Amino acid sequence: MADTAIRFGFLALLAGLIAFFSVSAPGFLSPQSAVFIFQSVAITGILALGVTATLVVGGFDLSIGSVATSSMMAAAYAMVVLEQNALVAVLFCLAIGALVGLVNGIIIVYMRVPDLLATLGMMFLLVGLQRIPTEGRSIAAGMTMPDGSTAAGTFSPAFLALGRHRFDFFLPNLLPVSVVVLLVLALLIWFFLEYTRFGRMMYAVGSNERAAELAGAPVKAYKIWAYVISGIFASIGGILLAARLGRGDIASGNNLLLDAVAAALIGFAVLGAAKPNAFGTAIGALFVGVLLQGLTMMNAPYYTQDFVKGAVLVVALVFTFALSNRSRR
Amino acid sequence: MEATFRITGLRKAFGPIRVLNDVALDLCSGEVTVLMGANGAGKSTLVKIMSGVHRLDAGEMTLGGVRYHPASPAEAIRAGVVTVHQNINDGVVAALDVAANLTLDRLSGKGAPLFYNPRRVRREAKAVAARLDLDIDLGASIADLSLADRQMVAIARAMAHEPKVMILDEPTSSLSSAEANRLFAVIDRLRQHGVAILYITHRMSDIRRVADRIVSLRDGSISGVFETKPLDYEGAVNAMLGRAMHLVAVDVKEATHPVFEANDLRLSDQSRPFSMVLGAGEVVAVTGLVGVGKTLLAETLFGLRRPLAGTMRLRGEAYAPTSTAEAIEKGVFLVAKDRAESGIVGDFNIYKNISLPFLERFSRLGVSRRGAERAVAREQIDRLSIVCRSERDDMSTLSGGNQQKVMVARWMAQPASLFILDEPFQGVDIAARRDIASKLRASAAGRTTLLFLTELDEALETADRILVMSEHTIVGEHRNEGLDMDRLLAQVAGEPMRGAA
Amino acid sequence: MSITRRTFSRLGLAAAAGLFAAPALAQDMPAPFDNPGEVKIALVRYLSTGDFFQAYLSGVEAQAKALGVDLRVLDSRQDAALQADMVDQAIALGVDGIIIQHGLTESMKEAAQRAVDAGIKVVAFDVNVENPAIPQIEQSDRDLARLALEQAVADNGEAWKAGYVYVAGIAPLDRRDETWREFKAKYPGINEVAMFGTLDNPIANSVANQARSVVTANPDIQVMFAPYDEFAKGVKIAVDEAGLSDSIKIYSADISTADIAAMREPGSAWVATAATNPAVVGQVSVRALAMLLAGEEPGASVIVPPTLITQADLNGQDIKNMEELSAKLPQFAHADVAMPAWMPNPNE
């Protein structure tokens, strides 16, 4: 009985919420609304999936929010200032994400800096770094450069399509690219963590590093890879953000970080896993999305939304730690 | 004699599982009562009830004739029942120095002064240390102490309460014999002071040394009380196990051909180089005191560290592993010491723990094949008689002996050239230990099985050949057949080294 | 193409900082500007990151250059205590005038008084230092909201369903909100069906998520009043994604190069915005200070009037960025405020 409650409690809560909003918010229960919920959590969801990888190896990545905004600035810079095409911009961003992840990993694994501190430092570094090329300006087509000239490039239509194109799915023009990317990445990382030996070894590293090492696992490499995954996922989030906004905005990305971490932590409670897992993270992100969509449709002011987010997180953590620990005695 | 501490009709269950059933136990002042029990018999639960961690479901406990039902560990200590726990690090605070640790309870107890006065603390600590003849720098940090010294600190602190009843839960499991002797001397002194002592242990040598009475616990009930001298040790073991355990006579086998050779291996700066040859089909035990380099040698063989000098050959080829992965690849496996810290992956169930090192062999294109993993796990569960509901059980649901069997099963699932087990019988009850030993011996053909054992009894029961280690080198070799016990013990104690030097 | 852009940008005001703003002839100027090289002024900033503050600084630099005075920029980067210390630093430097740009009343009041006591002329932009000797430079948030809303009424009549983006507790937004309330009272046909808003960054992305929910719940909204360009940007994304660009019109305040691009997208729902040119505010700040130094009285409060910019204006004159906006909409490039006859115009 208690086991069932722990396993399915959160999913039941999600179903209950959906039922509640369907009744009380007209228009909530429609394919468009469903797709929109996915769209609203796509970017934080992708970041959350990345941070899940670091949580799995027993680490943490506070730099994902600023990696995403740096990647957004980088995409805008590549296209608007350097006048590159969409492909170059995307590759540029992915390279930045991978590089930041690699540096994070090396600092943590080889320099033995605790993960929270290393990635906190990286976060500040990136918040500053993303402002240097434009001397603190946001990037938009036709912007004035620090030297007084005007940037000649524009956001390429192919790049903007990443944020605006919609695939036909049952209904015409239903599924935005970002949602498809979220779903694909969620499936990929879920499969990777649950069904490949690399994912399994990452869990082993997170649960008992010494045992994993004695079982012949290259522990350091796995840890570094986790941060690289996190960095790449965050940069993908940043690419989608740039494509949606159509410009490169100066931003710290702290809200992205907090929402992503919340999703990953809520994920601990899903199916009573009590550990980081990709499926839970996806459900966690969705849970927050459903709540915010429903509340906004019911005209709840923005500060109630932060409150509700926090409450959900606390409840999820209680679920995870109090209840599942009791079941384990 | 009137019992200082008396338990009658005690019962305790966790959910549907009955852990203790109608337990009755008397502890008398000035007497050491040894509590024997296999893993899972309920010893720990009994200790936790006595020390106020758990509440009993039914029954009565009295201390000095007064009802004693402690609601918390602090209450138990105030009443005069103190416990030295098996897990040494639970008994000390690593962040504080020795002096603060020795006086910790006074810092937090009722009526403790508000301000921390280092000089007063040092003075009190000195008094506490003196009681135990503790020779440890009071200013040293706990983190810098050996496990044995930490244990002594924990015991010294418990003694500072001037207890009426003292519970020692496997106190010697991490101590060298010299350190254990210090502990026994202290126990003798406590006995003279009229403290009632409950001593929980697996070790026959401890029991022979300290026991005034033996109480055997089996499946949550008292299965035997032995108090007439001379004590019937065999009977106590039988009562604990529920069947007669005869001393296992090892049917000594000869190695068929050499598998592993070490030439002039040097493990540390001061140590003398040594050579050894290990052959196929034999079980070799390396024995020696705690801290003589057994784990160092195991780690060197497994690629965790490099020897300072010397060469190794495996199946005729040079062997100098630079990583554990390389060692495993070449067929050298290690069941590491201290399974909780370096073996068990807590988040994984049984089959995932078993497949851990060989996941690659269970995978196709990087995707693990769970069916194959589970089949192998089931096979191993069968082979090693691991008690569990299924291969998907969590490790935390298993008893210590069964957890250790899973650790062994992990490596027995694949053929090895050199199979190393470092203290495989630590925290394992006798039944499980004999099970593991017989499985190791039965499957020994074709590989060398190398055991690192501090307990000589364990070596005598499992090995074909016994190597003695002292001061980071091998000082003696014995065939386990009519061996010269005096010589072996002398080598363990390090005398031949001095003679040779 | 790039040459024409260059040319335009040279006409523009940010670039004008360097190129066309030659100092006026010194002998025509009142003291102390007859010898402007000797005049030192300081800009003490509280906020500096972001496009608005960049443009503001360029305006200050342009006007200072036109006057030929020596400008020092002290930037406290949102450190209120440091900003107060910087005023003292400026006093120690022996400057003749100080512009205080943003800050907190509590921390700046005393520092400003110390500067005044030291005989230094002070003006303040967007921070009330509660000192009668210090003129306030202001952009009129009420006028901003009024211009945008008057356009909304002109476009849509006096009765429509509105969505409103607002976050309480931010001073300029609160002032814009007052005007919105007045309009709702004046035109009872305006029906506010939804109010939402957030400042979670990236703001446009967060607002877009909210606005998507709002337009899904209320697809009959005709007008979105988003009196801050980040809000408007987010609403536009949501309206586009919901495919409602034809039925919803967005009215906002503030403008940037990126906003111009968004307003000019084909079929854009963002039809008008009211904006004060931050560069002009910067110029006015320096001019008001210069008047004080010359012994003239700019008035206790110097208000920089906003300009209404419509999608039609932008498309009609093919305006692509802020420089072209200044060049082609003269009322945006220059405000005839604090402009005595002797004052050099940095835009000429």
Image (cartoon, rainbow, N blue to C red):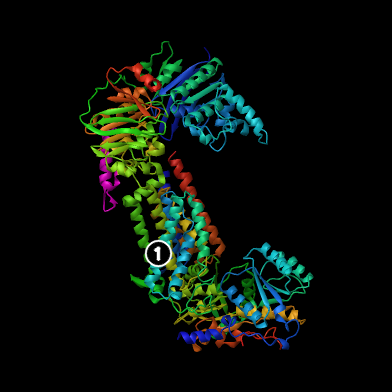
Q: Nearer the viewer, residue A69 or A285?
A: A69
Subunit bearing disc 1: A
Q: Quadrant of residue B255?
A: top left
Q: How many residues crowd mark 1 within 10 Å: few (<14), some (14–19), many (20+)?
A: many
Taking the magenta stretch, the answer to whether it contains residue B366 is: yes
Could you tell me residue B33's position as x and y percent? Answer: 47, 18
Question: In this rendering, does residue A59 appear at all?
Answer: no
Look at the magenta stretch and give its main secondary structure: helix
A17 relative position to B309: left or right:
right
Question: In this rendering, does residue C313 appear at all?
Answer: yes
Could you tell me residue B325's position as x and y percent? Answer: 32, 44
Q: Residue at x 47, y 86 (%)?
A: C3
Q: Nearer the viewer, residue B275 or C295?
A: B275
Q: Amino acid at mark 1?
A: Leu
- What residue range appears in magenta? B358-385
Taking the magenta stretch, the answer to whether it contains residue B377 is: yes
Could you tell me residue B140's position as x and y percent? Answer: 56, 33
**Residue reaching furthest left?**
B256
Q: Nearer the viewer, residue A13 or C243?
A: C243
Q: Residue at x 56, y 19 (%)?
A: B64
Could you tell me residue B118's position as x and y percent? Answer: 65, 34
Read off the residue under disc 1: A94
